[in-house]
Image (cartoon, rainbow, N blue to C red):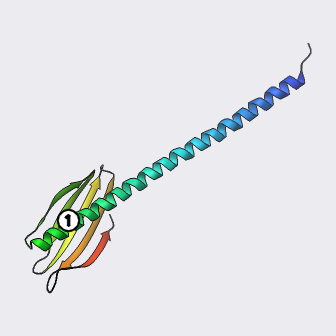
Amino acid sequence: MIINNKGISLLLVVIIISAVTMLIAYSATITGVEESITGLHQSKALEIFSATDGCMEEAIIKIKNSSTYTGESLTIGDVSCTITVSGSGTSRILNITSTMEGLYTREIEADVDWSSTFQVTAWREIST
C-alpha cells in the first residue's frame, strides 16, 4: 500500500487553516455582540438621563407656579418618574426617582428658593 504524504499534508494544512479561520470568525462575532450590548446600555442610560432631567424641569415649572405643589408621577417615553417635594416656607427640595424597564434607575435632587426671586440653588445626582 502506497501512502501519498503530500495529500495527507495538504489535508492537514486545510484543516488547520479552517480551524483558525473559524476561531477568528467566532471572535469577531463575540466582539460584535459585546459592542451591540454596550451600545444598547449607553442608549438606555442617555434615555433615562434625559427623561429624568425632563421630569425635574417639569417639577421646577410646577413648584414655581404653585408653592403648594407636592409632587406626582410622570411617564416620559419608557421612563417612569416619581417626583417628591419636601421643605417649607420659601425653600423646597425636589427629588426625582426614575426607573426604566426595571433595570435602569436614576435619582436627582434640586433645591429651589424663592425668598427674593425664584431660583434653583443646587442640582445634584444621588447615587443609587
Question: In which quarter of the view is residue 74 placed?
Answer: bottom left
Residue at x-position 61% and y-position 39%: 26
Q: Residues within 10 Å of mark 1 (few under 14, many from 20)?
A: some
Judge whether 76 appears above or below 5 on screen: below
Q: Position of residue 60 (x, y in %)?
A: 19, 70
Kindly identify the amino acid type of the residue bearing the numbered disc 1: Glu
Q: Give the side of residue 73 with respect to residue 99, left or right.
A: left
Per the image, label 1 sits on a secondary structure element best described as: helix
**Rendered residue at 18%/67% (across/down):** 59
Report whether 50 appears left or right of 66: right
* Residue sitting at x 33%, y 51%: 103
Give the vertical position of 100 relative to 53 (above or below): above
| Residue 32 x/y as whole percent | 54, 45
Q: Residue at x 63, y 39 (%)?
A: 25
Q: Nearer the viewer, residue 56 or 126?
A: 56
> Which quadrant of the figure contains the C terminus?
bottom left
Q: Is residue 24 left or right of residue 70?
A: right
Above or below, 38 against 70 in this view is above
Quadrant (top left, top right, bottom left, bottom right) of the N terminus? top right
Q: Kindly give the residue lying farthest to the right in the view shown.
A: 2
Residue 61 horizontal/vertical position (percent): 17, 69
Which residue does the numbered mark 1 point to in the structure image? 58
Q: Residue furthest left?
A: 68
**Percent from the top left, x then y, of residue 87?**
14, 76
